[in-house]
Image: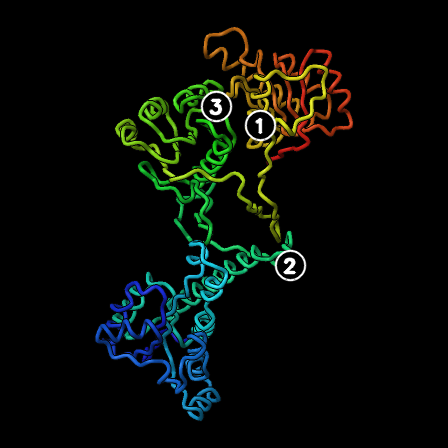
Amino acid sequence: MTNTLPITRALLSVSDKTGITEFAAALSKHGIKLLSTGGTYKTLKDAGLDVQDVSSFTGFPEIMDGRVKTLHPKVHGGILARRDEPGHVDAMNEHGIEGIDMVVINLYPFVKTMQGGGSFDDCIENIDIGGPAMIRASAKNHDFVTILTNPADYDAVLADLDAHKGVTAPLRRRLARDAFALTASYDTAISTWLSGQLEDKEAFPPRISFAGVLSQSLRYGENPHQNAALYLTEGASRPGAATAKQIQGKELSYNNINDTNAAFELVAEFDTPSVAIIKHANPCGVASAGSIIDAYNQALICDPVSAFGGIIALNRPLDAATAEAITKMFVEVIIAPSVNADALPFLAKKDKIRVLETGAMPDMNEKSRTYTRVASGFLVQDSDTGRITEADLKVVTKRAPTAEEMADLLFAFRVGKHVKSNAIVYAKNRATVGIGAGQMSRLDSSRIAASKAMDAAKALGQDVSLAQGSVVASDAFFPFADGLIAAADAGVTAIIQPGGSIRDDEVIKAADERGLAMVFTGMRHFRH
């Protein structure tokens, strides 16, 4: 690969014209001939630059409403010819093909058109064909051609031209890599969109791809010896930690983003003012109440020890009273759809706290997919949008839940959806009072949740566990009665669980013997 190559002719055809006039003018000062198409040609011509139209270069007009303008041997031959291959040089001479040493391209705004609600026909017309063809040709032949697909790279190329009278091999190769990544992500967006347009949708097509755009490099990953970065999915607009505006605080870490995402997704489950406190991607306190400050205070009661250094998510604007309460404790991140102006002075007193404003809440009914990396591949599944209402429940015990118990059961089961399996959630008055998460045994999760409820009572100066008079939710069925019995011993009065165990009768009998009400959901919420 030749280290530095001079540039004699550049083809410029861009949809995003940011900085293109200044860049073209700088190329012209280096004696580089300018070749262009359509709107870019007009922009450069109007700026007084000496630029040749592609149609005069090829001797062939643009046709079919511009669908065909650069798909011509004089363009692609000029890009793809190897200058060190005699046969290629002979072909250029024989067919009057002049070399094109630089190609400056960005693509029709397909994603923007799609996100803007463009019609099917508008989206189709914004699928670029000539652009990707030239990008791929230039990137393939980067031994001899410089490909630019991002205005952010203009300065680096001009610096090379100023310093070396050409573009160096390392820069050409890096630009080629970025060019292929662009066309791959562009095609991914189109393929994903087209899949959604099919009447007979395949659950999982023969091939699947996803693409991301680098948002920021992170200090490190889960641990300091791991490198990490945040990428945003093109075409996606779900509010959350990845796209939020940071109002104040230190730079977000890998763990911050992961935990904050978990917290915000959880709190979005509820329509009433709600707060979730998360530690290591598991909730340590969740509550719904009449106001956001009351929800915060109730959520904190559940496990104030674990809440230290946690993530606080709200589904309502962060107001002054709640900001003042939260900042009395060390927290890593606060995330809310908006932040009231009167909250800012309290937050400023703890300026290291990361405060994120999302602008909206995510739609929990939105269909999407989740991806999990495994060796040599990745697992794909639909996101868990399952929701249980009272109408879905089956009362299986002699006693039916009271109205108050029913409300708490539905609340607890919805929280359990966001707790790592095996998950046990105790709740009372739409607030968690004990959570057992991520245990290999459901019995252990029950015992941990009961222990947390007792610890919370002691923190309040009470002798009676907060689990007394509460309800309990299990994310999956009780395989034995022992987990239910542990919850009953802690003082619960009602249970919600999926059911489906071969020992359901045994579990139901244990509930009846203790005067408990129990309902089956028929739906489980494993979370690994």
Above or below: residue 21 compared with residue 295: below
Q: Position of residue 485 (x, y in %)?
A: 68, 16
Residue 6 visible somewhere in the drawing: no
Type of amino acid at the residue the image marks with label 1:
Ala
Asked which secondary structure carries label 1, the reply is: loop
Please state which of the two labelled residues, at mark 3 or mark 1, is closer to the viewer: 3
Q: Circle 1 is placed at which residue position?
A: 437
Callout 2, which amino acid? Pro
Residue identifier under label 2: 206
- Image: 190 above or below 172: above
Q: Looking at this rendering, what residue extends furthest in the top direction? A: 463
Residue at (36, 66) in percent of width and height: 15
Q: Amino acid at mark 3?
A: Ala
Quarter of the image with the C terminus in it: top right
Q: Is residue 413 left or right of residue 167?
A: right
Residue 426 spot, x, y in % from top left: 57, 20
Viewer-side residue, 510 vs 69: 69
Mark 2, other Cα within 10 Å: few <14 / some 14–19 / many ≥20: few
Query: Is 490 left or right of 188, judged from the image as shown?
Result: right
Would you call the spot at circle 1 few (<14 residues within 10 Å), some (14-19), or many (20 or more)?
Answer: many
Choose top left, top right, bottom left or bottom right for residue 22: bottom left
Whether 241 is drawn above or below 182: the answer is above
In whole angstroms, how far apart are the C-alphas of marks 2 and 3? 43 Å
Q: Which residue is depicted at the point 39% across and 28% down?
A: 331
How much space separates mark 2 and mark 1, taking CA atoms?
A: 36 Å
Left or right of residue 472, residue 481 in this image: right
Residue 287 tag number:
3
Q: Quadrant of the N terminus?
A: bottom left
Identify the element where label 2 is drawn: loop
Hey, which quadrant is residue 63 in on the image? Answer: bottom left
